[in-house]
Image: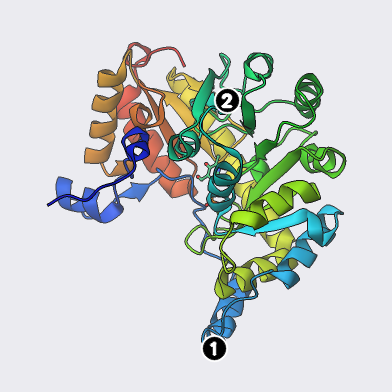
């Protein structure tokens, strides 16, 4: 027998998780595979962070600090804001979902880029609201003029993703500032900067400066990528106090756990070491992009820890290339599952992992005819 559910469930997008390494080894009878499919850090957490996690284990019989005071204070100091302007989440996903829960109702809209992070369409679907998906521009950046034009009196939330997942395109801070000037000042805006650490443009970081003075803006950051803590789930938002109160109103009291808070706090004490790892990833991103150029394989220049690579004229061709890479032990994400059919999203890993991708790509995509324009 079935159960009675909300009709909204029928509208929820289905998220197809990527294959695990174990799945691929079993399916293709391989001994080894490299996983470049989920934009993870190739580096394990720093040893000092691991030690802080171990130490915090002894206190797990107690509930976490529901206000995350120590971590919020440290983040506030880092960003030059008041602790009341920082909210923590069980990953930044948590804050994105909470924003949808707090702000969207039937009859209202969420304006978001497309293709972009697959979670965004869940928000209006869960709330019975409407999604207004605005295509990214030709180089994979949020099209801010088109997004501003899509904002109307029904808009209750705008999400910007910069750099954008899965395209890697980055819009300049000046353009974001202009966008914020174009829309009504009481429309809440989430600026999702999950990949901020990998940006090499000189204006990086200005999102948080804007959030200091614009009450309708919240900037989202995460410890999942540069800090290599995606398995622990901790992210945060920096924004005006009204924004923080909005998220606080709907979050569960203990939405971030003790180990995650301890790990993030320790991570903030070792930013130099994390930055060295980030620089290694950026150097590898540039190397992978140069190698793709040399092979004649199109891609979108990326400011993130992944690259969207052209893999065929259509979805079927892209999926076929994806299959061949899997069979050779290279796990990347088929763009067809991310709203980018005919392309592959390839995360940047360690040098040997990237070499494995490049060798397989040379085999499968090496002739320019194999890949459609990026
Ligand atoms: C654009 C974007 N935002 C947010 C997230 C979620 O990160 P977290 O692990 O902090 O929930 C991701 C994860 O891949 C992402 O790509």
- Determine the residue positioned at 52% across, 83% down: 60
Q: How many marks?
A: 2
Residue 211, located in which quarter of the rendered image? top right
- Determine the residue positioned at 80% across, 33% down: 203
For label 2, the residue is 301
Q: Where in the figure is residue 98, as x and y percent of width and height?
A: 57, 49
Residue 17, located in which quarter of the rendered image? top left
Q: Secondary structure at mark 1?
A: loop
Q: Where in the figure is residue 141, as x and y percent of width and height?
A: 61, 23
Ligand 1 has an atom within 8 Å of the beta carbon of the residue at disc 2: no
Crowding at label 1, few (<14), some or many (≥20) Cα neighbours within 10 Å?
Answer: few
Q: Where in the figure is residue 169, as x and y percent of width and height?
A: 60, 26
Residue 321 shown left or right of residue 56 in the figure: left
For label 1, the residue is 58
Q: Nearer the viewer, residue 187 or 219?
A: 187
Residue 356, located in which quarter of the rendered image? top left
Residue 251 shown left or right of residue 129 in the figure: right
Q: Residue furthest left?
A: 1
Residue 97 shown left or right of residue 65 in the figure: left
**In the rendered image of this protein, does residue 165 appear above or below residue 369?**
below
* Residue 177 visible in the displayed image: yes
- Determine the residue positioned at 74% across, 70% down: 69
The answer for how far apart the CA atoms under marks 1 and 2 are is 45 Å
Q: Where in the figure is residue 364, as x and y percent of width and height?
A: 29, 26
Task: Give whichever of discs 1 and 2 has the lower sequence position.
Answer: 1
């Amino acid at each position: 027998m079935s159960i009675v559910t909300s009709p909204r469930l029928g509208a929820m997008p289905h998220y197809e998780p990527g294959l695990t390494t174990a799945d691929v080894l079993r399916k293709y009878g391989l001994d080894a595979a490299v996983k470049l499919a989920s934009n993870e850090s190739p580096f394990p957490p720093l040893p000092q962070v691991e030690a802080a996690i171990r130490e915090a284990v002894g206190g797990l019989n107690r509930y976490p600090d529901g206000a995350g005071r120590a971590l919020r204070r440290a983040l506030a100091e880092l960003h030059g804001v008041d602790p009341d302007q920082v909210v923590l989440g069980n990953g930044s996903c948590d804050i994105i979902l909470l924003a949808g829960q707090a702000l969207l109702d039937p009859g209202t809209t969420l304006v978001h880029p497309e293709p972009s992070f697959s979670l965004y369409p869940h928000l209006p679907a869960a709330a019975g609201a409407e999604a207004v998906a605005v295509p990214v521009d030709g180089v994979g950046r949020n099209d801010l003029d088109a997004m501003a034009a899509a904002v109307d009196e029904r808009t209750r939330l705008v999400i910007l993703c910069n750099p954008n997942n899965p395209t890697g395109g980055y819009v300049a801070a000046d353009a974001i500032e202009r966008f914020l000037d174009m829309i009504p000042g009481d429309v809440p805006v989430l600026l999702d900067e999950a990949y901020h650490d990998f940006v090499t443009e000189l204006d990086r970081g200005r999102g948080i400066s804007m959030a200091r003075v614009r009450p309708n803006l919240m900037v989202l950051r995460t410890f999942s990528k540069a800090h290599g803590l995606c398995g622990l789930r901790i992210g945060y938002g920096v924004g005006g106090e009204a924004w923080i109160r909005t998220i606080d109103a709907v979050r569960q009291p203990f939405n971030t756990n003790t180990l995650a808070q301890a790990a993030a706090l320790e991570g903030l004490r070792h930013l130099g070491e994390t930055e060295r790892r980030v620089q290694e990833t950026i150097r590898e991103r540039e190397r992978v992009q140069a190698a793709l150029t040399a092979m004649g394989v199109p891609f979108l220049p990326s400011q993130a820890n992944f690259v969207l690579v052209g893999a065929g004229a259509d979805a079927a061709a892209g999926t076929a290339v994806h299959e061949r890479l899997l069979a050779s032990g290279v796990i990347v994400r088929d763009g067809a599952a991310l709203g980018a059919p005919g392309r592959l999203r390839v995360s940047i890993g360690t040098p040997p992992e990237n070499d494995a991708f490049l060798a397989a790509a040379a085999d499968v995509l090496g002739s320019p005819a194999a890949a459609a324009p990026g």
